[in-house]
Image (cartoon, grey):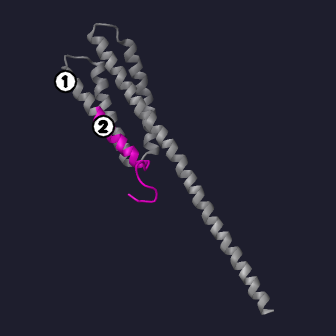
Amino acid sequence: MASQIITLVGVLLGAVTSFFATGLAERAKFRQTMATRWDERKLDTYIEYISCVKEANRAARQAVEAHERGEDHSEALSAMDAAEARRSILFEALVLLGDDAASQAAMTVNERLWAILRHTREPSDTPTADRQDLSVSLIEAMNTLHKAARSDLAIGRRPGIPT
């Protein structure tokens, strides 16, 4: 009788251990799946946001160039405004999904882009060097955003090595 009880306790102990081990494995698998899902969404948001900033900057440059040649630049201004409206929406997604460093970097990108857009909407006798300085500062801000996004997405880190 004692041997049967010991066998029964062993089977129960094995079943409980198996149950908890399987539960832990499933929980880890679920967390990994969710992390991957959000990382994919973050990557898409970063790419769309940066592409939209570049699109707005390109349209602004085209508008300034058309204005300097004395041509109609209304089409380029419309494209610039459309890209800016889309960038605004994408920025909200970036803030929701990205970490604090990426959000702060994106805010700096916004400020630099706004300076370019303001200059484009209100053309003046601003020297070409000043416009180039605005473009360089936007590129620097975007490089900082790229770095923050790579860090947020753990790109360039070895798996299992904490930062």
Please state the horizontal and vertical placement of residue 120, each as a whole percent of the image.
29, 20
Quadrant of residue 110 in the image? top left
What segment carries the magenta color?
138-163
Q: Residue at x 31, y 12 (%)?
A: 66
Q: Residue at x 31, y 19 (%)?
A: 121
In the picture of the structure, the residue carrying the numbered disc 1 is: 129
Asked if residue 106 lies left or right of residue 134, the reply is: right
Residue 108 visible to the viewer: no
The earlier-in-sequence mark between 1 and 2 is 1
Residue 151 colored in magenta in the image: yes
Mark number, residue 141: 2
Please state the horizontal and vertical placement of residue 42, each as a whole percent of the image.
48, 43
Q: Is residue 125 above or below residue 34?
A: above
Please state the horizontal and vertical placement of residue 87, each as a whole percent of the image.
42, 31
Quadrant of residue 94 in the image? top left
Asked if residue 117 lies left or right of residue 125, the reply is: right
Q: Is residue 29 above or below residue 119?
A: below
Mark 1: few, some, or many residues within 10 Å (few <14, many ≥20)? few
75 and 14: which one is in front?
Answer: 14
C-alpha gap between disc 1 and disc 2: 18 Å
Quarter that holds the C terminus: bottom left
Query: Amino acid type of disc 2?
Result: Ala
158 and 124: which one is in front?
Answer: 158
Give the total of numbered labels. Answer: 2
Q: Residue at x 29, y 12 (%)?
A: 67
